Image: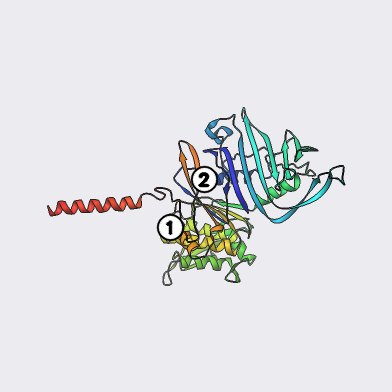
Amino acid sequence: MITHIRMKNFKSWQDSGEVKLAPLTGFFGTNSSGKSSLLQMLLLLKQTVGRNEVIFLGDENSLVNLGDFQEVIHGHKEEELLELEFGCQLQKPLTITTLQQPDQYRQHYELAPLDIDSFTFDTAIRGNVGDLFIDRFSYTVGSGALENIRWKNGKVYYGNRHMNTIITKPNCYGYSTKERHSLLWPLSFAFENLFDNVYPLGATRVQPQRSYHWEGIDPDSVGQNGEDMIASLLNARVDQQTTPYAGKNVPIEERISAWLREMDLAYSFLIKRTNRQTDRDFDVLIQKCPDSAQVTLADMGYGLSQFLPVLVHCYYAPKGSTLILEQPGMHLHPKVQSQLADLLIEVITERNLQILVESHSEHLLNRLQRRIAEEKISVDKTALYFCRNDNGVSNIERLKIDEFGNIANWPENFFGDEMGDLFAMTKAQRERQKRAEG
C-alpha cells in the first residue's frame, strides 16, 4: 500500500507537502485544481518501470502523456528540480544486505541482513537543453541515517558511506540490467513490484460494442480505458476466480450482477457465445427488469457502459493492489453515485484493496460520511482532501472528519452554493408572488 506522496515543482504543484494516503483516499476540488496531477505522479512512475531512461514522460500510447520537461516543471522554470516522493508498506517483507556500524567489539563495518516491511523513495530530476538528468534518488528503510541508501553522481551511498558501487546510467529509481548485484537491486525490484500492482482506470472509457472477440488472453487488468473489461471477465470465468463476500468466496460475475441489481442499473447481466461467426465471439446481454427483453450493452444507457468497467476493475484486480479511479461516478444518477461509496468500502474491506479516487460527487462524499457515522468504515481507513488552485499554484487541505462523519473544515462553496441558490430562489418566488398580487 502506498502510504504517502509528495511532489515539488510538478505541474501546478510547487510543493504538495506530504499527502497521507489511506485504504480509501478521495481527492475533491474545483476543475484544474491539481487533483489529476496527484494521480499522474504515480502513473508517471509506473510507466517508467523497466525503461532504460531517466523518467518516461509518455507518448500517445502511455498511461499519461506529459509532453516535455518544460511542460512538466512548475512555472516552466527549467532550472528547477522536479522532486517526487512516496512511502509504501510492502505486502511481503524484504531482506537487504546493509552495513553494521563498528562498535567496541568491531573495528570495521560488517555486512548484515536487514528485514524491511516499508520504505520511502524520493528522486530529483533536472532538465537541460531537452535532456533529463538524475540529480539523486534514495530509499529510506528506517528511521536512522544509516538506513538511507541513495545514488548521486554515479555512486551508491549507505548513510554517509560510499559503497564502492558505480552505477552510471540508472533511471530515476535505480533499474540497471547489468548491475543488479548492487545494494540498490532489491529495492529497485520492490519499486517495480509495487507499481506492477497499481492499476489505473481513466475517466473516459471505451464505447460499448454489440459483440466482443476474445482470443483467450489473460489481461492483468481491465485496461486504462476499460478496453479489456470483457476479456477480464471471460478469463475470470475460465479460471473460476472468486472474491470474498460475507464469509464466502463467490464468483466475480455474481458480485457484479448483484451490484447492478442493487444499483437498479440492470436486473441481469450475461456473457454468452454468439451464434454468429466463431466461438471466440461473445455477446454481453443486459436485462433492465424481470419482464424486459435482453439487449446488448450497446443498447443500454451510456451510464451503465461507462460504469461497468469500474465494477469489473474492483473485482478483477488482484487482492492487495492499488486502484486509481478517475471520476468513477461520471454519467451516474445521484443515487448510484451514493452507492458507489458502498462498493468501494466493500472491496477495500473484503479484497484488501487500496483505492485512490478523484471525484466531484457530493453524493459519494455524503454516503462516506454516513458510513463513518454508522461504523461501516473507520475514520483511519479514509483520507479525504480538497484541492484548489490559487494564482496558478495548487494547494491541498485534508478534510477533518470525526468519528460521527462530521467535517470540521468544510471549504466554502465546496459543491457550489446550494443554500445560496435556495435562498435566491425563495426570494425570487416571493417577489413574483407580490407582483402577481399587486
Identify the amino acid type marked 2. Ser
Please name whichever residue, 233 or 351, is drawn nearer the observer in this view of the structure: 351
Helix, strand or loop at label 2? It is helix
Residue assigned mark 2: 36
Identify the amino acid type marked 1. His
Label 2 – label 1 distance at C-alpha: 20 Å
Please name whichever residue, 264 or 110, is drawn nearer the observer in this view of the structure: 110
Residue 274 sits above or below residue 2 on the image: below
Q: Closer to us: mark 2 or mark 1?
A: 1
Please name whichever residue, 294 or 406, is drawn nearer the observer in this view of the structure: 406
Q: Is residue 297 visible?
A: no
Rendered residue at 51%/65% (across/down): 375
Helix, strand or loop at label 1? It is helix
Would residue 228 appear left or right of 286 to someone viewing this image? right
Instruction: Work out which quarter of the rendered image holds the N terminus and state it.
Output: bottom right
Residue assigned mark 1: 363
Return the disc, 2 or 1, that comes first in the chain's sequence.
2
Instruction: Categorize mark 2 by other alpha carbons within 10 Å: few (<14), some (14-19), many (20+).
Output: some
Would residue 98 appear left or right of 71 to someone viewing this image? right
The residue sitting at the front extreme is 104
Residue 282 sits above or below residue 393 on the image: below
